[in-house]
């Protein structure tokens, strides 16, 4: 029932949890691997790690860092990180370099790895989920940033030597299993390849450095800003992605006022490309707003199954986890059964549309809510949440492909 309860809040944009309890200690492990014995040299991972480590220190993190680490050195750094996490409230792991997935499990590739045969994977590489497990066992908040999807010769060589009984290595990284109190950010979409970059930093690291220290900004809003920068800088060829199960709002730099508006991208795409993207959605902002007001913000408990299957389709990703339509119907039906009445509204002027080609867009907006319980002794829920929806246009209209939300003060 725990996952279903979280899902219910996610659908409604009502993560009504403490926003002001900031853990006393924050500990980070930052690794950059670029000089590979068997795969040549990546220009930027060490630069990325050095700059991210410095930025994290500047905003109060204790940082353990290592660059161009072999397998044993990497394992020692992870052990040191585990020791340092004792008593900490937040753990953060940042990795830049080569990574790969095998059978849906993600691995860090040390610089001395020799991955000419699939059977060597367990001996030569380090599973990323083991680092995440260490953080989750010791901290309330676990943050992972992976710029590890760069074009990877190890994946190609392993695939060539794989037999029918061997696991096949793939470029890019896979989605993690849903985890507790975590936020995992990828430099590009699952299974896709990210760019190393032509300047000092990769596009992903550059955008993180640009936005991570903005006061009052939630981690979700930070990733929207990062994604905008990377999409613009890479001319739509790379799109950062995240999954998470945080149970409270997280800000890298707390702020008293509202979060600042996202800055323009560091290297905006040519004007004609931006114009083409805007035209791809064009006047559809009006149709998206109509979809929100008519469908998303006016749930009817009597026709919940029909409504869910119409606006979500066969399935949807909520905070990085995929749910089918039947699970969504059950959660929403159970949720609305406890309320005598409810009101959901779109805050005027808050809707922001980010187009992604001809038939996809992100919609971010502030939503007002008011729930009156049937049980008169229960608490009435009122407030505001910031909701972000990934939308796709089908023949019958817009559908929700992904959904996240964050409580607003």
Image: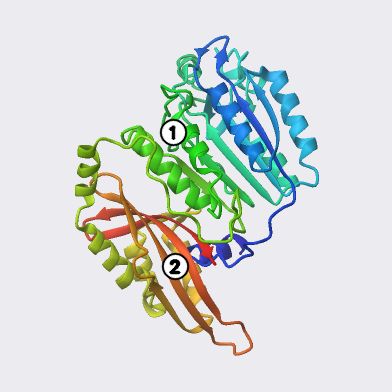
Looking at the figure, which quarter contains the N terminus? bottom right
Whether residue 288 is situated above or below residue 73 in the rendered picture = below
Q: Quadrant of residue 69?
A: top right
Q: Which residue is mark 1?
A: 191
- Callout 2: SS: helix
Name the residue: 60% across, 48% down: 252
How many labels, in total? 2
**Residue 162 seen anywhere in this rendered image of the structure:** no
Q: Callout 1: 10 Å neighbours few (<14), some, many (20+)?
A: some
Name the residue: 57% across, 47% down: 183
Front-most of residues 171 and 184: 184
What is the x, y in percent for residue 62?
72, 38
Task: Tell me: 140 left or right of 214.
Answer: right
Q: Which residue is mark 2?
A: 329
The disc label shown at residue 376, or none: none
What is the x, y in percent for residue 302?
39, 80
Q: Callout 2: 10 Å neighbours few (<14), some, many (20+)?
A: some
Name the residue: 77% across, 31% down: 80
Task: Tell me: 279 left or right of 218.
Answer: left
- Callout 1: SS: loop
In space, the residues marked 2 and 1 are separated at their CA atoms by: 30 Å
What is the x, y in percent for residue 378?
62, 84
**Residue 373 seen anywhere in this rendered image of the structure:** yes
Whether residue 297 is situated above or below residue 311 in the rendered picture = below
Task: Tell me: 387 left or right of 140.
Answer: left
């Amino acid at each position: 029932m725990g996952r279903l309860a979280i899902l219910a809040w996610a659908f409604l944009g009502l993560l009504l949890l403490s926003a002001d309890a900031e853990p006393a200690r924050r500990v980070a492990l930052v690794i950059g691997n670029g000089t590979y014995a068997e795969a040549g040299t990546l220009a930027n991972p060490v630069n990325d790690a050095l700059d991210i480590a410095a930025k994290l220190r500047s905003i109060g993190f204790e940082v353990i860092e290592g660059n161009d680490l072999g397998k044993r050195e990497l394992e020692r750094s992870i052990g040191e990180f585990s020791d340092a996490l004792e008593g900490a409230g937040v753990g953060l792991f940042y990795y830049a370099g080569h990574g790969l997935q095998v059978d849906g499990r993600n691995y860090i590739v040390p610089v001395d790895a020799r991955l000419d045969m699939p059977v060597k994977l367990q001996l030569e590489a380090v599973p990323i989920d083991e680092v995440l497990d260490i953080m989750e066992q010791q901290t309330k908040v676990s943050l992972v940033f992976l710029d590890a999807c760069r074009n990877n010769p190890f994946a190609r060589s392993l695939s060539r030597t794989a037999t029918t009984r061997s696991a096949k290595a793939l470029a890019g990284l896979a989605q993690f299993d849903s985890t507790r109190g975590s936020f995992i950010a990828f430099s590009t979409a699952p299974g896709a390849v990210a760019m190393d970059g032509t300047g000092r930093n990769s596009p992903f690291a550059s955008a993180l450095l640009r936005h991570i220290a903005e006061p009052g900004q939630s981690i979700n809003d930070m990733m929207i800003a990062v994604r905008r920068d990377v999409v613009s800088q890479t001319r739509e060829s790379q799109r950062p992605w995240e999954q998470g199960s945080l149970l409270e709002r997280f800000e890298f730099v707390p702020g008293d006022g509202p979060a600042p508006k996202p800055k323009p991208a560091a290297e905006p795409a040519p004007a004609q490309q931006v114009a083409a993207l805007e035209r791809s959605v064009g006047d559809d902002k009006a149709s998206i707003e109509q979809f929100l007001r008519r469908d998303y913000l006016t749930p009817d408990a009597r026709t919940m199954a029909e409504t869910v299957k119409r606006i979500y389709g066969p399935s949807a990703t909520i905070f990085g986890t995929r749910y089918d339509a039947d699970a969504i119907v059950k959660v929403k039906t159970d949720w609305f059964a406890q309320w005598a009445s409810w009101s959901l509204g779109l805050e005027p002027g808050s809707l922001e549309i980010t187009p992604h080609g001809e038939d996809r867009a992100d919609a971010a907006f502030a939503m007002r809510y008011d729930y009156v319980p049937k049980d008169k002794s229960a608490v009435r829920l009122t407030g505001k949440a910031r909701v972000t929806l990934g939308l796709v246009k089908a023949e019958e209209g817009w559908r929700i492909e992904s959904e996240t939300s964050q409580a607003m003060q």
